[in-house]
Image (spheres, rainbow, N blue to C red):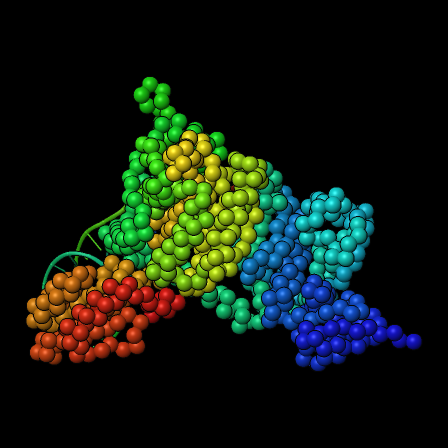
Amino acid sequence: MTVGIEVVLPDGSRRSLPDGATGADLAASIGRRLARDALAVTVDGQLSDLGRPLPDGAVVSVVTAGSDAGREVLRHSTAHVLAQAVLRLWPGAKYAIGPVIEDGFYYDFALPGGVHFSEEDLTRIDAEMRAIIAEDQPFVRHEHSIDEGLALFEDQPFKREIIEAVRDGATEVDAAPDDGGAAVSVYWNAPGFSDLCRGPHVPSTRFLGHFALMRVAGAYWRGDERRPQLQRIYGTAWESGTALADYLERRAEAERRDHRKLGLELDLFSFPEEIGSGLPVFHPRGGLVRRLMEDYSRERHAAAGYDFVATPHITKAELFETSGHLDWFAEGMFPPMQLDGGQDYYLKPMNCPFHVLIFKSRQRSYRELPLRLFEFGTVYRYEKSGVVHGLTRVRGMTQDDAHLFCAREQMADELRSTLSFVLSVLRDYGLADFYLELSTKPEGKAVGTDEEWEAATETLRAAALAMDLGLVLDEGGGAFYGPKISVQAKDAIGRTHQMSTIQLDFQTPQRFGCEYIGADNARHRPIMIHRALFGSVERFFAILLEHYAGALPAWLAPEQVRVLPVRDDHGPYAAKVADRLAAVGGRVSVEGATEPLGARIRRAKLAKVPYVLVVGDDDVAAGTVGVNRRGADRPERGVELTAFTDELETVVAERRNEDAAAGGR
RNA sequence: GCCGGUGUGGCGCAGCUGGUAGCGCAGGCGACUUGUAAUCGUCAGGUCGUGGGUUCGAGUCCCACCGCCGGCUCCA
């Protein structure tokens, strides 16, 4: 008597299978190709092993390698193979966790005798992994009681700790079986190797192989710096050799776009060791780009009703005592200098208290609100030595910082208009693909009542939803004084960067006793909104540079046009061309005929100059130029000088942005 | 701050088991006068990150510190 079960496929169709049928049976019943490619199934949306019996009535879909779910499974399984290889090569090694991450996986180990992995070890481990894969080891799932699990991993302290966490009811643990009960699941590969794991896994190691070990790194157990540091190996794994190669190529492209590399090649900025870690200097070309970025920002801020202010770089300690920064972030500040007989002065890590004092400098009326104070304010933060990184994480930076003071009833409108202003400006710099993130109250590190936080968070949420962009929640990610919305932008090669932040702050106005006189002739407390658009000029510079791969659009390019006379006697005409372009505001240079044209073209191209003009006999005679546009297939000969002048003027006036993905090629 | 790696002229690199530093590009000068991605020649440039140590002798070995790179932790 066969009872039989019925499952629902993703397309809604139903399929009958014998009782006890597995995912593999289902795949086989659908087709031979699917049976071959299947790695796992999802049962009612939950990933599960191909070999487990399917429940009656479930919605089941077969997972193959080319899908997100499929890659997750094969990465997880590859991580197990990595662990097995390390345990083979280092008998007595302790293994911790090996989760899937974006584009790959890692596994953490503690090697016997506190030994560390070296880069060369990766080659050996890689070879061992390939041997394991060639052995075609099946992944076999077993479920055990807590006690059995503890016995099984008797000499594996990290595994025992995970099992104990499962026993004690921690839910976030990766090894908890998905079907409940006080038990753990273990996957066996070979007699000598098993790993605590929720699964699912590929049926056997032969489904794996398109992987690469990327690097070794130290990582704290459970991400806690007070706990032992383990040895982590990062790897990536894909469904095919092509997909793996594509991934490696994407990484290579990111490396080519690295702003630190471009900054050096294009002579934009440097980090002199003599000055100190995380303290950049901008060279003339970089300084020019920076000025262009800032100039347009100022223009937009002026038009949007911001008032420009300026504040000093250091202050008495009291200011940051009042603001609360010294309570929360003294660690992140440069140590104080003692002046005037024991008075502590600090380098400022933030601009807000200064702007508050400007607000407080006289009595304010509701008629002045919203008051929008803007400044390119340079701040200094003592970043820990290991975190400093190019222009994106520095110890001295300039924020395009604004603080908006408004009445409570203006808050919602002000947030909405600020958010659209911010997005509009970012779009003008060429970023186009955004989503928003709402960061809520941080646990144990916040001031203010729950009611205030709740009200502020909801107001921000409403403003964010009004933007018609994706909104994700960042639980506990807010600042200590209030929740925030941040704008996340995708760059030309698909990476996400946190750009602007807009933070609501009920606390600071209270701490400083800010007031304004309302229409009712009574004193009221303003709401304060912190807002940075670029975040920091340095970081935004870096992001734009990487976004455009150094090929900044003409309106931001330090050098827009380079004129190359073919021969020396074309020099006077080249100079005339340059003068005409400079007269309409063009940033132009001329490189004389001391070297063959090809070499000069090449140099100009490498400098990523948007327009390279070549002028020779024909041009002198006809009043034309040869235009070699960055990114164009071939140069254009015989362009009227006036036509080119107009083109340049238009492109710059419109702030026309180029296809950043092309990177100026 | 922690783990690992790394540090040679402006840049990219070579320098074997220790025997007082090389190459390419860039730069200066000279020649070449060139129509769309590298003309030729020549010259100059380095206390090998810093400070200790081992050694007859250290760029090569050891220690400490600094910078940088990749992670972890952190990021108002």
Q: Does residue A513 appear in this view?
A: yes
The answer to whether A589 appears left or right of B67 in the picture is: left
Q: How many numbered discs?
A: 0
In what quadrant of the picture does the N terminus of chain A appear? bottom right
Residue toward you, A96 or A176? A176
Instruction: Give x and y (percent) for residue A417.
Output: 40, 53
The answer to whether A53 appears left or right of A625 in the picture is: right
Q: In the rendered view, would you say A385 is above or below B13?
A: above
Residue toward you, A609 or A533? A533
Quarter of the rendering containing residue A586: bottom left
Instruction: Give x and y (percent) for residue B44.
Output: 19, 51
In what quadrant of the picture does the C terminus of chain A appear? bottom left
Q: In the rendered view, would you say A501 is above or below B57?
A: below
Q: In the rendered view, would you say A430 is above or below A613?
A: above
The answer to whether A332 appears left or right of A50 in the picture is: left
* Residue at the extreme front: A520
Instruction: Give x and y (percent) for residue A514.
Output: 40, 33
* Residue at the extreme top: A341
Name the residue: 34% across, 47% down: A400
Name the residue: 28% across, 50% down: A302
Instruction: Give x and y (percent) for residue B36.
Output: 23, 76
Name the residue: 63% across, 43% down: A113
Q: Does residue A259 appear in this view?
A: no
Quarter of the rendering containing residue A199: bottom right
* Residue at the extreme right: A1
Name the residue: 51% across, 44% down: A456
